[in-house]
Amino acid sequence: MGWLEKLLEKMRRLPPEMRYEEVERVLRAYGFAEERARGSHHIFRHPNGRKLTVPKHRGQVVKTAYLKQVLKAIEEEGQ
């Protein structure tokens, strides 16, 4: 099992929070690129135009609600 599969499995378990760097790595693997960051909100864009906002809470973690949005976006891309 590679790093991407391990991170996706961890994300699918929906922990209360996950490190921002792990979420960012998954998004980049699925073609999302960080468009801009303002404060704690980081906006990622997929080449097909889809946007996804991922805020970092308490500095370095992403909450469960945003993990669900990331999983949904990845599934909708059909990858």
Image (tube, grey):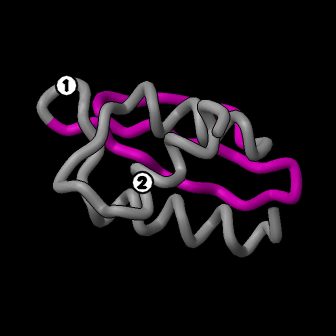
Instruction: Say which amino acid is labelled 1.
Output: Gly
Compared to residue 12, the image places residue 35 above or below, namely above
Task: Give the crowd class for mark 2: few <14, some 14-19, many >=20 residues within 10 Å.
Answer: many
Residue range in magenta is 32-57
Q: Is residue 48 left or right of residue 46?
A: right
Name the outermost residue toward the front.
1
- Specify the quadrant of the image occupied by residue 14: bottom left
Callout 2 secondary element: helix
Q: In the rendering, which numbered label is found on residue 11? A: 2
Identify the mark nearer the N-term, 1 or 2: 2
Which residue, as the protein is rendered here, is positioned at the far right? 48
Residue position marked by numbered label 1 in the rendering:
59
Residue 76 in picture, x, y percent from top left: 72, 74
Residue at image point 77% right, 50% down: 46
In reply to whether residue 51 is colored magenta, the answer given is: yes
Q: Position of residue 31 (x, y in %)?
A: 79, 42
Residue at (66, 33) in percent of width and height? 2
Count of all numbered marks drawn on residues in the image: 2
User: Residue at image x 61%, y 45%?
Assistant: 5
Q: x, y (%) of residue 68? A: 41, 68
In this rendering, would 42 be left or right of 78?
left
- Majority secondary structure of the magenta segment? strand
- Which residue is at the front of the view, 40 or 58? 58
In the rendered image, which quarter contains the N terminus?
top right
Q: Which residue reaches farthest left? A: 58
Horizontally, residue 9 falls left or right of residue 44, namely left
Indicate whether residue 30 is drawn in magenta. Answer: no
